[in-house]
Image (cartoon, rainbow, N blue to C red):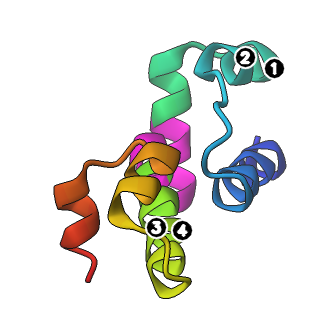
Amino acid sequence: HYEFLSDIREQIYNSPFEKIEIDDICNELGVGRTYFHRIYNAYFGTSYLQDIINSKLENAKKMLAEDFTIEMIAKITGLTQKEIENLQ
């Protein structure tokens, strides 16, 4: 499972705004959601959801450095304006 999950994690960080359906991942692995979350956390020391949030925050920081407005970043990332302001 590790190689497949590593690919998923890489996809999360390379394409943070692409929606990856957890049910599709579970079907591909042949496991239930609970077990998926358990093994993801065991392999990476963080949750699937936290990786998604972290990838969006990292990209929001890059966008701030590139002079995107907070409003634009919020619209693109789905983060709140307050979350983005806290990155500054």
Which residue: 44% across, 44% down?
A: 75
Disc 3 to disc 2: CB gap under 8 Å: no
Q: Nearer the viewer, mark 2 or mark 4?
A: 4
Image location of residue 88, percent across then percent down: 26, 83
- Asked if 88 appears above or below 71 in the picture, the reply is below
**Residue 44 within the magenta-colored segment of the rendering:** yes
Q: Which residue lies under the disc numbered 2?
A: 24
Image location of residue 51, percent across then percent down: 48, 54
Disc 1 to disc 4: CB gap under 8 Å: no
Label 2 to label 1: alpha-carbon separation = 6 Å
Q: Nearer the viewer, mark 3 or mark 2?
A: 3
Labels 3 and 1: the sequence-earlier one:
1
Q: Which residue lies under the disc numbered 3?
A: 60
Label 2 to label 4: alpha-carbon separation = 24 Å
Q: Secondary structure at mark 2?
A: helix
Which residue: 24% across, 55% down?
A: 81
Q: Secondary structure at mark 3?
A: helix
Q: Which residues are magenta?
A: 38-51
Residue 59 marker: 4
Q: Nearer the viewer, mark 3 or mark 1?
A: 3
Q: Residues within 10 Å of mark 4 (few under 14, many from 20)?
A: some
Kindly indicate the quadrant of the structure image that contains residue 69.
bottom left
Q: Secondary structure at mark 1?
A: helix
Q: Which residue lies under the disc numbered 1?
A: 28
Near-viewer residue (86 or 66):
66
Labels 1 and 4: the sequence-earlier one:
1
| Amino acid type of the residue tagged 2 in the rendering | Asp
Image location of residue 47, percent across then percent down: 42, 47
